[in-house]
């Protein structure tokens, strides 16, 4: 569950970097709660192709985050703001 929440959060940051097909499969699986088999049937491709694409998307999202740190920086800024220590924000702006 925690991994799913993390990967869907990353998706919200980086979805525009994915192809339409990748976005469609991801949203069907994570937001619409369709099984890989249902997605495969709907798109007339193999379940293996869906599985492979979803793994590739997860890898891409993790790679984008490791390079760009958008979610990490957001979480850090949110934490800093919650303790009202504004002097720590400068390095993230």
Image (spheres, rainbow, N blue to C red):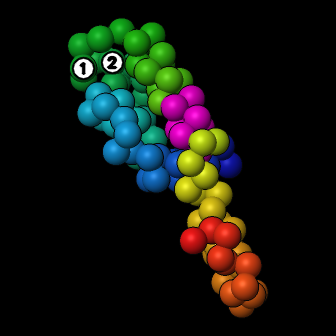
Q: Give the magenta-colored segment's residue range.
A: 58-65
What residue is shown at x 31% (from left), y 31% (from top)? 19
Seen in the picture, residue 49 relative to 53 is either above or below; the reply is above
Dividing the picture into quadrants, the one containing residue 88 is bottom right
**Magenta stretch containing residue 64, yes or no?**
yes
What residue is shown at x 40% (from left), y 12% (from top)? 49
Mark yes or no: residue 13 visible: yes
In the rendered image, which residue does mark 2 sit on?
40
Seen in the picture, residue 86 relative to 52 is either above or below; the reply is below
Q: Are marks 1 and 2 in contact (CB under 8 Å)?
A: yes
Farthest bottom residue in view: 84
User: Where's residue 56, x and y in %?
Assistant: 50, 23
In the rendered image, which residue does mark 1 sit on?
43
What residue is shown at x 33% (from left), y 18% (from top)? 40
Secondary element type, mark 2: helix
Residue in front for this viewpoint, 87 or 79? 87
Residue in front for this viewpoint, 87 or 43? 87
Q: How many marks?
A: 2
**Magenta stretch containing residue 67, yes or no?**
no
Within 10 Å of disc 2 (Cα), the crowding (few <14, some 14-19, many 20+) is some
């Amino acid at each position: 569950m925690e991994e799913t929440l993390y990967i869907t959060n990353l998706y919200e940051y980086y979805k525009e970097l994915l192809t339409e097909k990748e976005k469609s499969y991801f949203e069907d699986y994570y937001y619409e709660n369709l099984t890989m088999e249902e997605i495969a049937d709907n798109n007339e491709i193999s379940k293996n192709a869906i599985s492979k694409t979803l793994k590739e998307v997860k890898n891409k999202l993790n790679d984008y985050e490791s390079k760009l740190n958008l979610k990490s920086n957001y979480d850090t800024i949110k934490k800093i703001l919650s303790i009202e220590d504004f002097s720590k924000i400068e390095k993230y702006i």
